[in-house]
Every structure is written in C-alpha cells, then in structure tokens.
Image: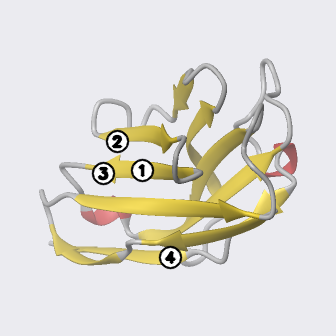
Amino acid sequence: VQLQASGGGLVQTGASLRLSCAASGDTFGNYGAGWFRQAPGKEREFVAAIRWMTGMTLYADSVKGRFTISRDRAKNTVHLQMSSLKPDDTAVYYCAARPRWLAGGMTKVDDYDYWGQGTQVTVSS
C-alpha cells in the first residue's frame, strides 16, 4: 500500500484546512487509517484514526471537537478536516494505515504498517 498525503499549507490562527491521504496498491477494505503529526524537536504524536469498514473514529484530546477524520470509499481516501487551528497545531502531518483495525490500539506509531510522506501544516499567530 502506498499512501500519498496532501493539503498542507500556511494558514492563520482560527483558519481551517483539509488534509487528504490517497491510498494505492490496495483498497482500504478492513483497514484502520490514521493521522499523526510531528513538530520540530518533538516525537510523532497521534491525531486521529478511523476504522474503514465501520467509520468508527478516535481522536487525541488536543484535537477533539476541532478536527474530523472521514473516509471517501469511492476514492480510497482519508481526510482530516482541521478547524480552529492554533499555532500549536504546526507540524508535519503523516497519514498511516494498517490492514486490520487494532482494538484498544491505533494511537501509537508502532500500531501502523504503512506511512505516507508527510505534509507541512503551519499556523501563524
């Protein structure tokens, strides 16, 4: 599976941005897909995840209520709609996937098998 992330950019505080992650090489099927982010000097951290088959979602507390993860079955694509962006949201955002949803998991880097290349999101104050 190859993942291609896109949609990053430079925005002001309070703005919205939508990231996309297109999968090729396989259909998501029963996959779990997620978004992580990594700010300079920090470890990669979980943002959100979605179970492809059921649409069940998980969110980090820091983005709950502001970010929404969704899937487009027809385009084999996962989106991350980000609203009310803050400077603390500045990071490189990575999409990731694993062939089967991991019950009780999906929030750690090691839970995922496939990674996209990352897209930069910068929020200015």
The crowding category of the residue bearing disc 4, from other C-alpha atoms within 10 Å (few below 14, some 14 to 19, many at least 20), is many
| Residue 26 place in picture, x, y as percent | 80, 55
Say if residue 23 shows up in the picture: yes
Select label 1 or label 2 by which is in front. 1
Say what amino acid the circle numbered 4 marks.
Thr
State the SS at label 4.
Answer: strand
Residue of label 4:
119
Residue 91 image point, x, y percent: 46, 70
The reply to whether the C-beta atoms of the residues labelled 1 and 3 are less than 8 Å apart is: yes
Q: Earlier in the sequence, mark 1 or mark 2?
A: 2
Secondary structure of the residue carrying numbered label 1: strand
Residue at which label 3 appears: 82
Label of residue 80 in the image: 1
The residues tagged by marks 3 and 4 sit, at their Cα atoms, a distance apart of: 14 Å
Q: Which mark is residue 11?
A: none
Which residue is under mark 2? 67
In the image shown, does 93 or 31 lie closer to the viewer?
Answer: 31
Q: Quadrant of the N terminus?
A: bottom right
For the residue marked with disc 2, what is the amino acid? Answer: Phe
Residue sitting at x 54%, y 26%: 57
